[in-house]
Amino acid sequence: MSHEPTTLAQVIDSHSVTTRRPARIVVLVSGGGSNLAALLEATGDAEYGAQVVAVGADREGAGGIDLARRAGLPTFVERVRDHDDRAAWDVALTEQVAAHDPDLVVSAGFLKLSGPLFLERFEDRYLNTHNSLLPAFPGMHGPRDALSYGVKITGATLFFVDAGVDTGAIVAQVAVPVLDDDDVESLTERIKAAERGQLVELVGRLAREGWQIEGRRVRIGA
């Protein structure tokens, strides 16, 4: 496979990815878009190495879509219920994202599990952030499960999405102590702050330096 210098991102047989500035990012949201807002602020710096080129959602009225529109970005909404089945939705979502030729796709609070076509098209380029230190406490209730188990340290994990539930190759993790007086709300908010900073830092590094995936190990810098 040849690699022309004009290509922004290339996925090669060893699962190595290299980018040329600025990397193109499509962000997927379901809610208010606080992670999206942080990414948009970061990409305002020309040295960051990436730009958000489109924002998509799985529901009308998502605050992240409104934020993107105010920023003048292309947006799209693909609702599952507007399609005959999840497979048809998977096709539509894949086509919507692919139309913007992204180097990275970032789930910023996107609450739908992507389908096999989407995962194949954006293999090793689809990032998600989870509110626990994976593989501990996967699923929808990371902070609640961490409190119930009684751990003293939890945190956030940035990973490349695969076909499992929060099982993809880990890019980075950040630790958050569990305080004696924490409840689910207070712990969740501190994890959110930590994962937002990690997301912004690591998306920029991936865009500027590229990455390699060898088995389950992600190496930044190709």
Image (cartoon, rainbow, N blue to C red):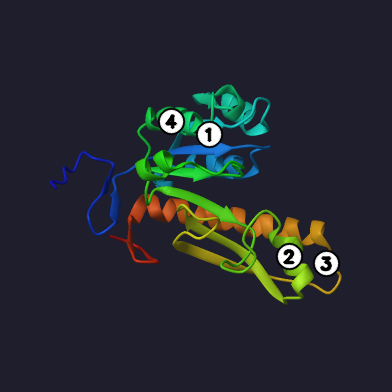
Q: Is residue 172 above or below residue 87?
A: below
Q: Amino acid at mark 1?
A: Arg
Q: Nearer the viewer, mark 1 or mark 4?
A: 1
Q: Nearer the viewer, mark 4 or mark 2?
A: 4
Give x and y (percent) for residue 24.
39, 38
Q: CA distance from mark 4 to mark 2?
A: 34 Å
Q: Specify the farthest residue to the right.
A: 181
Give the residue at mark 2. 145
Give the mark nearer the N terminus: 1 vs 4. Answer: 1
Q: Are the residues flagged by discs 3 and 1 in contact, CB closer than 8 Å?
A: no
Q: Amino acid at mark 2?
A: Asp
Q: Amino acid at mark 3?
A: Asp
Q: Is residue 88 left or right of residue 151?
A: left
Q: Nearer the viewer, mark 2 or mark 1?
A: 1
Q: Residues within 10 Å of mark 4 (few under 14, many from 20)?
A: some
Q: Is residue 53 above or below residue 144?
A: above
Q: Quadrant of residue 151?
A: bottom right
Give the residue at mark 1. 86
